[in-house]
Amino acid sequence: MTYNKDKFKISYFYLIGLFYSGQGYSLGSLVLLFPIYMLNELDASSRSEAVTIAAIMVIPWYVKFLFGLITDNFPMLDMRRKPYLLIATISSLIGWSTIYLHDEISLLFVFSGFMISLGSALGDTVMDGQTIEITPERFAGRLQGINWGSRGLGLGAAGYVSSNIVDMYSWGTFFLIVGSVGVVITLLAMLLPEYNIQNKVVSDGISLLFKLKLILMDIKDILSKADPLLKINYFLFSGFSLSIVLQITLIMETEFGYSFREIGITALIYAIGSFLGSILNGVITDRNDNLIRYSVLNVAYSISIIYGITFVYVRNEILELIFFFILGIFGGAFEAYQLKIIQKESKEPYESTIFAIFTGISNIGQFAMGGILLVFIADFFQIPLLMSMQLLLITLLISYFFIYKFKFSKEIEN
């Protein structure tokens, strides 16, 4: 069946939202609860060690461009997307079915986590490319709002549902349920139509290596036309500015002393805020995207981060819930805006590859840089995470400078 964007159905958004919410639940459980699992059940010696191991497990999310390169240019069974979704399903199944077999932190334990991340990162890359292909550009903001908003709801479910599963049953039950969700949603994603774009530089008459060389040259040519260094730095520092997501459950347990049930409720409130912020930002920026709106978003997100310092000195459960809700709203909106910029930079026929390059850079900033550095600073200087989190104000300002240079300054000139 031949598909074009004129055939897009609004009902596809429901399936897209279902996929990303399930993925958010699966990946969120890995990112949010694994550090706690390693601290409480295995032999992790500190928060820094637990977060570092979790960051190693998600390495596939840093190199998503490799998956994009493969799925964009090397079809299987005359399809560019669905066979790779099946591979992602198998990888996730291997990871989730073996992760609970380890009773200590070891290479095999890290490998199981790596396989989980490989499946989710590959599935995410395929879906990113596929949804960009089938969605008209007029829905770009809404698509990325649904993308991150649904993932945020899944993240909240990871905090609320999964923490209650652990509290009421066991970690083994948790791994079984989360793994099942990760596998099922990847299979459901195969119901979306596939948009067949023939790669103009790939020909069956040339060698594989020469094909790859031509593809890379073509991608380099596309990226080099529009301020690549400015964009790379923007995605790196804006990703760093979103690393608070990795610290949330650690703040709740190690600094606020929350039980698993309390962690779940608070994480759900954060996720609802993230969902609302993502969707509202998508609708608003689809109608009118300008420097003033983006500046207001940055100021609001900065204020929500600063608000966290309050709880270093004063504890109040209601105010803490408000804090996480507000942080979710503006963090979700900020993430959705970043994804919208990435979508607009992802050109045919390399949607998955270019989208994965920029999201991979953002993930490096979020997981490998911010995720580890904030916890390391807090542990090294013996200060609360809510204090080290203020470093994000600097990275927000840096990312603002870069997006102004490559986007808003040109729009003002025009």
Image (cartoon, grey):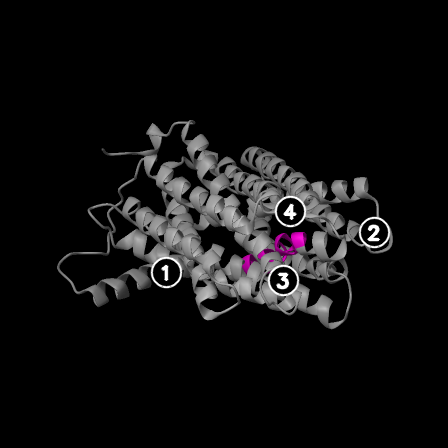
- Mark closer to the chain start, 4 or 3: 3
Q: Nearer the viewer, residue 404 or 158?
A: 158
| Residue carrying label 2 | 310
| Magenta range | 234-249
Judge whether residue 116 is colored magenta. Answer: no
Give the answer, above or below, for where 209 lies relative to 327. below
Q: Amino acid at mark 4?
A: Gly
Q: Residue furthest right?
A: 314
Q: Nearer the viewer, mark 4 or mark 3?
A: 3
- Can residue 341 be spotted in the picture? no
Residue 289, image x, y percentages:
58, 40
Residue shown at the point (55%, 51%) measured from the top left: 171
In the rendered view of the protein, which quadrant contains the N terminus? top left
Between discs 2 and 4, the one toward the N terminus = 2
Earlier-in-chain disc, 1 versus 3: 3
What's the CA distance linking mark 3 and mark 2? 27 Å
**Residue at point 40%, 45% (across, down):** 183
Residue identifier under label 1: 66
- Disc 1 to disc 4, C-alpha distance: 28 Å
